[in-house]
Amino acid sequence: MKATGRDFAGMAARAAGEAKVFFFCGDDSSAHDAAQKIVSLLRDPGERIEFSGADLKRDPVKLGDEARSNSLFGDKRHIFVRAQGDEAYDAVEVLISGDVEPCPVLIVATSATEKSRTAKLLADRPDALVAMFYPPDLKSVAGSVRAMADAAGLRIGGDMAERIARSAGLDTRLARSEVAKLALYLDASAESPRSADVAALDAIGAKTEEDGFGALVNVVLGGDKAKIPGELRRMRELGLNPIGLLLAIERRAAQLAALAAKLGPKGDVTALLKAEVQARRVFWKDERELGAQLRQWRGRKLERLVDKLMGLHRSLLSNSQDSELLLSQGLAEIARAAAG
């Protein structure tokens, strides 16, 4: 089975009931949301087992063994994989070659597309779903924010939805976190809805792109090493979550990868970005920084950036007590690479 962002919602329930292997690619934020949607639709998702693509690349047999084994108490389970590109290809090939039906396996593949080897391996199988998501624009993310707000019992206007979308860098995972904080602050629920205003949004610390993640994202990817200590200090003062910040940088790296693919080896960066702004796929205030970053991060250098961010993400999740230190060290390394 195949799906895109346009038709995924309409076929998600059927896919959750019929498929066993799910490959989500394209825009990382949308792919992650889609994977969570499938989990919510599974009849009995049970225990969650997580692997990285690097784990499976080192040991391709592990995925099939785990997907066909029983959990400790014989309960249901599902497997969630965060991979980079086609890291999981060999593991998926081993998985689908077995005779025993596996538990549901969901793979979110950063920098992969529907033309990746893993996607082609699964696309024509009735027991698999390949879902490709293109980068969202401000309008679509703002619409998603309003839907999140409705579900949380919040009444918000279009301007506020756009503000939350921009503050999250068009990343729906970060936007969902802001909506959840706002609902908690206002004691809102589906049964007891509340109206949210700008004052409430300011009170929970939801920042605009100028005073939230955006400045630090641009400092790091722009290679401005001298500004990093001050920006990290500001991050601590504002209480910005290290994982949230890293997700914002991952989001920008994925955006750069998508733009680089459109650009090609000899494309015109300025012309491409003007067209993207015109189509509202790029926020006009980001045009200058994106242009500079796209010229700095190309080809193999951009691939190494994505790999570095994936590794840093895993380190932060497994060492939460040292997350600020690990993040500071990792961002300094990235900034040096950008400046070099």
Image (cartoon, rainbow, N blue to C red):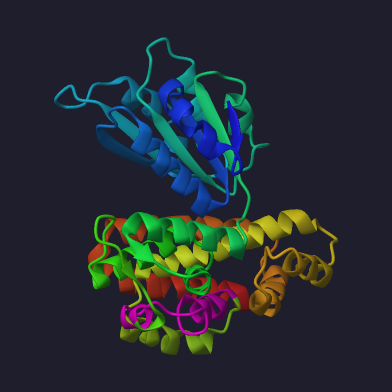
Residue 56 image offset from top left, x and y in percent: 43, 36
For residue 43: magenta?
no
| Residue nearest the viewer, comparing 62 with 188 | 188
Report the side of 310 relative to 271 (left or right): left
Task: State which quarter of the image contains the C terminus.
Answer: bottom right
Give the total of numbered labels. Answer: 0
Residue 2 image offset from top left, x and y in percent: 60, 30
Residue farthest left in this picture: 73
Residue 6 image offset from top left, x and y in percent: 61, 42
Report the side of 138 relative to 77 (left or right): right
Measuring 39% from the left and 23% from the top, which residue is drawn there? 64
Measuring 47% from the left and 73% from the top, which residue is drawn there? 160
Q: Is residue 202 above or below residue 275?
A: below
* Residue 98 falls in image quadrant: top left
Task: State which quarter of the image contains the N terminus.
Answer: top right
* Residue 253 falls in image quadrant: bottom right
Q: Which stretch is magenta?
A: 200-221
Measuring 33% from the left and 79% from the top, which residue is drawn there? 200
* Residue 239 falls in image quadrant: bottom left
Measuring 36% from the left and 70% from the top, which residue is drawn there? 242
| Residue nearest the viewer, comparing 199 with 6 | 199
Residue 312 image offset from top left, x and y in percent: 41, 61
Q: Is residue 265 above or below residue 80?
A: below
Q: Would residue 340 be seen by someone viewing this image from the given angle?
A: no
For residue 216: magenta?
yes
Q: Is residue 135 above or below residue 133?
A: below
Report the side of 23 relative to 202 (left or right): right
Q: Would residue 161 be seen by someone viewing this image from the given angle?
A: yes
